[in-house]
Amino acid sequence: MPGPKKLDPSSSPRALLGAELRHRREAEGLSQEELGLPMFVSGSFIGQLESGTRRMQVDQAEKLDEILRADGFFVRNCAALKKSKYPDHFAEAAEAEAVAKAIKEYAPQLIPGLLQTEAYARAVFRAYRPTAPEDVINDLLAARLERTQLLNDPTEPVFWAVLDEAALRRRVGNPTVMAEALRHILKLAREHRIIVQVLPFSEGAHTAMDGGLKLMSFSDAPPLAYLDGLGSGQLLDDPGPVARYELTYDLLAASALSPELSLALIESVAEDYAHEDQQF
């Protein structure tokens, strides 16, 4: 069995905390399960803290300082984790996404953030915040575009999206914005960088009508599920619920068009937008 992933403590505050936590736990001769017991968390949760897939909270840092006799190290450094460019409800999910080996996402209304173009993302943020100053929109946009850089790597993470047909048909911005956004997805898929399927309207009711779903898997930590809501989100690591959401995604993929037919539909809708734009 391969050993735990080697963390680079200089890469981020969370990597620093994870590396130090692992070092101090092993120095005390404790397993992840043994350390988790007095903290009322699972051993897998400790593993997620160590691997950098979960964000350490202040109350957890206080307990770790006490158990591991760390003289306030974790509390002092935990403060750096509170600074995030993402909304509070999504910050931890975004950080986990950045170290995931594979991401599966069901998008019911919008093109997923990792696949959005600049013009599309700007139109989304302006719709969310119609009265926000331009600098606020620009900050949100910069964070979104930074996230999309994850797909610059030719192999990791593996990204598999199931898009509801509504995400293709719902106009965000103008027809030019939509045509560009859909052609960007086509380009990524045809370059074999992503897998994309479309869940057509003709499928009717399905297993994920309540909202968006993101599944993330890691090389050295248990998988996570993120449920997306209106200005809210929930990151789950309990094996039971995560397994149920994995089944949910499998059912969605089984109901969706094949990747080949999905690309044909996306291209057709993109052409419709392009023709619509030419008429004005």
Image (tube, rainbow, N blue to C red):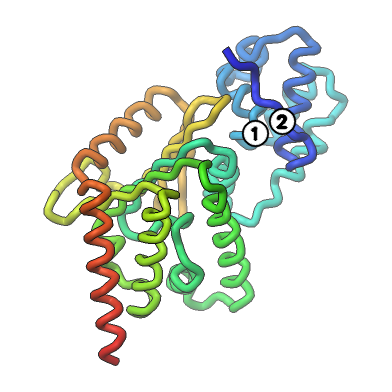
The foreground one among 71 and 188 is 188
| Residue occupying the point 78% across, 31% down | 74
On screen, residue 194 above or below 47: below
- Residue 87 on image: x %, y %: 57, 55
Secondary structure of the residue carrying tag 1 is loop
| Residue occupying the point 19% across, 54% down | 200
Q: Which mark is residue 234?
A: none
Residue 37's quadrant in the figure? top right
Image quarter (top left, top right, bottom left or bottom right) of the C terminus: bottom left
The foreground one among 100 and 78 is 100
Secondary structure of the residue carrying tag 2 is loop
On screen, residue 103 above or below 179: above
Image quarter (top left, top right, bottom left or bottom right) of the N terminus: top right
- Position of 126 with respect to 18 (left or right) is left
| Mark 1, other Cα within 10 Å: few <14 / some 14–19 / many ≥20 | many
Q: Which residue is mark 1?
A: 52
- Residue 176 on image: x %, y %: 37, 79
- Position of 142 with respect to 259 (left or right) is right
Residue 48's quadrant in the figure? top right
| Residue occupying the point 39% across, 72% down | 180
Q: Which residue is mark 2?
A: 7
| Residue occupying the point 23% across, 36% down | 251
Q: Is any atom of residue 211 visible in this view?
A: no
Q: Verify CB contact (< 8 Å) between mark 1 and mark 2.
A: yes
User: How many marks overall?
Assistant: 2
Per the model, the C-alpha gap separating discs 1 and 2 is 8 Å
- Residue 42 on image: x %, y %: 56, 18
Q: Earlier in the sequence, mark 1 or mark 2?
A: 2
